[in-house]
Amino acid sequence: MRRAIPAPEPRAGMLVCVCDPQLDAPANDNGPRAASTLALAVGFAFAVLAQTVASAALPLAGAQLAPRPELATWPFAAMLLGAALASFPASFLRDAFGRRTGFALGASLGIAGGALLVAALMQRQFAWACLGALWLGMAQGFSFFYRHEAAAASGRPAAATAGVLAGGVLAALAGPTLAGIAEDFAAPFFLVGAAGLAALAHTCSLGVAVSLASDPVTPFRVRNAAPLSAILWPTLVGGLAWFGMNAVMSGAPLALVGCGIGGAAVFGFIALHVAAMYAPAVPLAFIGDRVPPAAIALTGALLVGAGVPLQAMGTPESITAALICVGAGWSVATVGATAWIYRAGPPGRLALALHDGGLFFGAVLGALMGYLLA
């Protein structure tokens, strides 16, 4: 007597054929292959390109469009708020609809956000700029799940996380040149080319997302998931690093302009900062799993803490040093915190959402404080 093949548990977004399970296993949208780290790194790199351009453009756009000076950092803060708000849907939609759909949705939000920011700059609408920044941030929130995708599929979460983050180095280095070309193309509209480039980068990220390998069967449905308490300290340490980094980053463009640096040159300073954000991931991809994750995360947080007083000194040299310091510290802390949450076992979807949401809310608070450092 032939043994019956059980049908898989139905879930939203799963494509199942109408067939007799006695004869053949039902087909679905989940294949046996995991996405390669290289593909995840490429998709993340395009998102980093958009982040590099938007991080430099949004504070300047805020200063240009804000009705009051104290509101100048609101578009940048809106981007980070969007990333925080996207943490929960990014976590749960990935399980419901698969990695390709989740990452494609995030990239689509980035395309819409960049296009709305273009319209805001051309029509001089501050509210539109904040909304476009919110959508760009939601795209960023989805893109940061590339690192969780890699860490969950690897037995070396620190190395896998660092490998994905390392993909941002080339994107950060290419950012100023591409932004300059885009700005020349869109002249005389200031920052419109940069906003359009952010939308184009997310378009490329969308192309990578839809080409990813089909999902393994329900990889995140872990029966013995680690308790929620396991994410407490990694989230606190990582959140402090994100707070300090974004306090410096959001205020730096305005501070540099106040020191006499031209608006176009600010993209170069921010790109240097973003390169510092991802460069430490390269060595951590090789040695990250040989060092305790807590030690990595705490080291990164201390580096960020060392950069904050440098920003307050107010010279171009000290601001540059602060940007490099907090960028490198952010990278180290993020790799350490991500690996730390996997120490107690595979985290559940709620744990991942709460962890990333905590990091981004720390970033939002830091961005709101950036005006005081500008």
Image: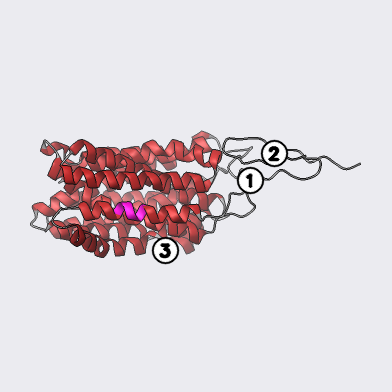
Q: Where does the magenta region start and end?
A: 198-202
Q: Position of residue 155 (x, y in %)?
A: 58, 54
x 65%, y 44%: residue: 28
- What colour scheme was applied to this rendering of the protein? secondary structure
**Which residue is identified by label 1?**
217
**Which residue is identified by label 3?**
282
373 part of magenta stretch:
no
- Residue that extends furthest to the front in the rendered view of this protein: 18
- Which amino acid, mark 1? Val
The answer to whether residue 373 is left or right of residue 301 is left
Is 27 above or below relative to 37? above
The answer to whether residue 27 is left or right of residue 245 is right
Tell me how far mark 2 sits from mark 3, CA to CA: 40 Å
**Which residue is identified by label 2?**
8
Q: Position of residue 74 (x, y in %)?
A: 21, 38
Is 348 above or below relative to 39? above
The answer to whether residue 300 is left or right of residue 25 is left
The secondary element bearing badge 3 is classed as: helix
